[in-house]
Amino acid sequence: MWQRLLDIISSLKLTLFCLAAALILVFAGTLAQVNLGIHVVQERYFQSLFVWWPPDSTGLKFPIFPGGHLLGGILVVNLVAAHLRRFRWTWRKLGIHLIHAGLVIMLMGGLFTDLFSVESHMRLEEGDTKNYSEDGLLVELAVIGESGNGEEQVTAIPEKRLQQGGAIEVEDLPFRIVVKLFYLNSQLLMLDKAGPGAVRAAERGVGSQLAVFELPRASAVNDRDLESAVIEIVPHPVAGEVTAASLGTWLVSAGLGSPQTFSAGGKQWRLEMRQARYYKPYTLTLQKFTHERYQGTEIPKNFASRITLVDPGQKENREVLIYMNNPLRYRGDTYYQAGFDKSDKATILQVVHNPTFMAPYVACVVVGVGLLIQFAFHFAGFTRRHQEKHAS
Amino acid sequence: MKRWIPAIVVAILALWMAAGWVSAPSRADRFDLAAFGKVPILAGGRIKPFDTLARNSLVIIHGRQTVRLDDGRRLDAMQWLADVFFNAPAADTYPVFIINHPDVLGLFGWEQGGRKFFSYKELDPFLQKIDDQGKTADEVEAPRRTAYQTAILNLRNSLILYQRLKNSLQPEDATVFADEIKAYLQAMPAGLEASRKREHNEKFDKDKLDFFAQFANRYDSMASSSQFLAVPSPHEGPGQLKDWHTVGETLLASVSTGSVDPVVMAYALAGDAYRAGNIELFNRHVGDLTEWMGKHEPLAVPRVVFEYYFNHGQPFYQSMCLYVLAFLLVCAFWLGGSPVFNRTAFFVLLLALAVHTFGLGARMYLQGRPPVTNLYSSAVFIGWGTVIIGLILERYFRDGIGMACSAVIGFITLIIAHHLAESGDTLEMLQAVLDTNIWLATHVVVITLGYSAMFLAGMLAILYVVKGVCTRTLTRESAQSLARMTFGVLCFATLFSFVGTVLGGIWADQSWGRFWGWDPKENGALLIVLWCAIILHARLGGFIRQRGLMIMALFGNIITSFSWFGVNMLGVGLHSYGFMNKAFPWLMAFVASQVVLMVMASLPSEYWRSNPADSRVDG
């Protein structure tokens, strides 16, 4: 029984099956990008164990195809098992071994990148200083309390938690937050323009004049989801009370500009749905952004940001230049010149935190050497036989 | 005697090639448009000769590089452009605008007849309509446009291009432009004085101001509608990269200098002479321009002149002809001809490769870039790579197969390149992220060589199937040697596709911060790598033999064409810089043909005319 399982796991047939399935998956995932957009496709096809049908269903759904993580995982297991079982050291096999060792590194690196890398961005106008980057996709609900002495108490509730719904208790907050509804993508309309039957989204704040509607996830490259939630603020009962009255419901949304305020526990609080932030132990300041174009055209020639990097902990204070194909790597983060605002006064840096970014480089070298050795052997054999044939 | 036949044939062909590069000597009784065609301008971000502008514009508007007039005369691109610049009323009557779509004709109330070229004059009454319809179409994303929307938008863009060309060197309604400029200079002091007074709320001469403002408005609209920059700024010393300006801007700048730029004046005088039919005067002013540019743009001019000859020599067209000839010679050899045919084919192919290489090298020199920078150059390069691999195969097998395959692919890829050139300048400037010669030279070149090898393997498979099913020439031995070639080329394809894909990942990691992003073009490359891995493992495990290998190599053709062209048609992703709708039916036809061949290859042996006895083959 075990023997039989081991045979299957290390079989060439399984390799072929996985490769063929990967071929189909990649093809389908490429075509699907036309309608779904690259992010949704990545989630559904490549960074998943299975491709599910129907994809959006929260209830009954079926796995219709192995996803990227499953196929990659099986391939690694299959490869390692096959090599362990049939490994015999010969110089002739050196190339093959190197190729496959490199592939394992590459697949593992890919998996780790999927699991542990974080992509965010930092938008800086000339003169701006920031010590955080913002997630391009995820939002967070920031609850900011003013303590009076100029300091602020910031509580950020991640999108995942909001999505789960229910009551959220946070220490230090004199109230709990109850998530009434959460939309991954939504549309906000003024109540009087929302058509008949529309109801106000919330009781308090700007939400009392707005209606909120759920939308399907954004698919176009330049579209992004507009997350919205309706939350209720319920203060903790003070001594002597059994329950405290709810302060009412608020609409919070990535589509709302300014924060909304309320008071509880003797303090003023601000509510804001904003891009999730990642704080750094250092700051970046944009000195100057330049955008060159080819003469007489609108074709961009180069973008460059001159940045001052200040890190008190490491006693760093220096200027760096980030431009196309020349990122800044610092303390595990890499900053890339990604874009700019229309006015050419602000830069957008892509920030990538990827602990395993070296894996593909190592893998590439190992596989490359392996391929060269392997085909050198092949070619030498081929010419030798060829000459023998002609000599005879 | 027989020994010398290949050498003689190649020598004759080489002479024919060389003749294409020699342009007719300039004659005193003709407008020297060859000299005019070599004058540099700055368009699309790079300095190029008028000749290139003429050819590219005419290809965009007309779909080809020459115009046949209703009276049977044929104009080349420079003759057409000179009329557009200097003799707009005549140029307006030339049937140049290509309209293929019946609905676009219907918009004008015209029926689809034998005619597909129309003149500006005929379209003039409908300009507003075309503009409105075109604007609406422009708002639709390119991949979602209907055929009609694409057609009307193309027509609108052609008309805009044409109008811009007409107003680039002088206003299209100018009569004697040199005199007009003189009048402008004379009106300037009084006009400026009046304008100054008005600003200070003093009493001013309104007539003088209005008279002067007429000129200024005219040149201002020229400045904004010029298709190219014609005047290098004269202030910096030689050798520096100069700022270029449009004629309109330069005329407006005269306000501060009080004089007219010599280049503007030379263009004006040349244009007036052209309109007046004064050949001698035109040639003299063009000579002045040439001399001035040579003195002030000493670095750019040799390159520009070289580009002119490159345009004229058409090396890719020449090598296309040679590929056909080489293929015919191989066929003659196969049909029982003497081995001389085979040897001649080899040398003809070498000559074709030399011309092809020269063309690639010339483009690299002109652009200052590695060979592959866009879809057009990838087609040229795929052909080049295939021919080299094919010739190497031929060295080992000497049965004409390597040559036949490389000649066919060389020819087809150059045809594809020819059609890709219809969108304009093929030496366009590169977007910022592509502006890196290291990665263009490594990732792009390697991955393109991978395409070459895949197509060559596919072609070998086609030959195997066609020979096997339709003829009796596929013997056991030739089948074995074909299988060995195919396998070898596939190994090569695996190596290059894999290394190229990984290099692409590293580039992406360097510039976007992720090694792999599941972008369509990346996925396309991955598909090739996966398919190669499947073929190699299937053969290793004995799951496929000779025929299986061939069927899989044929499917490789489909995958490679999808990766090369298909993903660009999806219109999504970071690499979709080479979008084209028109090629879609061709891609589908190609895929269908490969499927048919795969079915043929799967027919039971009794339907094959040859019987290579599907025996085990070792590579």
Image (cartoon, coloured by chain):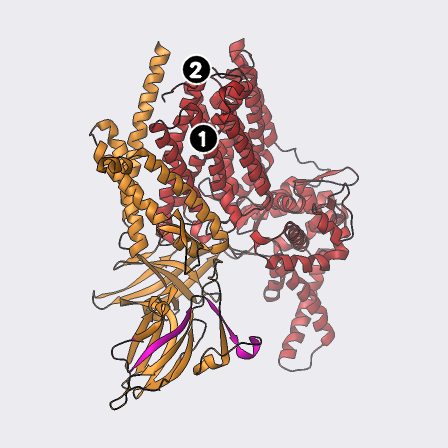
Examine the rendering and report whether any part of residue B39 can be seen: no
The total number of labels drawn is 2
Q: Give me the residue at 65% from left, 75% from top.
A: B195
Q: Residue furthest right?
A: B71
User: Where, quadrant-wise, is the C terminus of chain A in this rendering?
Assistant: top left
Neighbor class of circle 2 (other Cα within 10 Å; few <14, some 14-19, many 20+) is few
- Is the Cβ of the residue at disc 1 closer than 8 Å to that at disc 2? no
Q: Give me the residue at 27% from left, 86% from top.
A: A149
Q: Colour of chain B?
A: red
Looking at the image, residue B76 sits to the left or right of residue B477; the answer is right
C-alpha separation, residue under disc 1 versus residue under disc 2 = 20 Å
Numbered disc 2: what chain? B
SS class of the residue under badge 2?
Answer: helix
Question: What's the residue type where badge 1 is placed?
Answer: Ala
Using the image as rendered, state which of residue B338 and residue A14 is in the foreground: A14
- Residue matched to label 2: B477
Tag of residue A322: none
The orange-coloured chain is labelled A
Which badge, 1 or 2, is on the more N-terminal residue?
Answer: 2
Neighbor class of circle 1 (other Cα within 10 Å; few <14, some 14-19, many 20+) is many
Q: Position of residue A262 (x, y in %)?
A: 37, 84
Tag of residue B553: 1
Q: Give me the residue at 31% from left, 37% from top.
A: A368
Examine the rendering and report whether any part of residue B461 can be seen: yes
Using the image as rendered, state which of residue A237 and residue B601 is in the foreground: A237
Question: What's the residue type where badge 2 is placed?
Answer: Glu
Range shown magenta: A169-197
Q: Is residue B556 magenta?
A: no
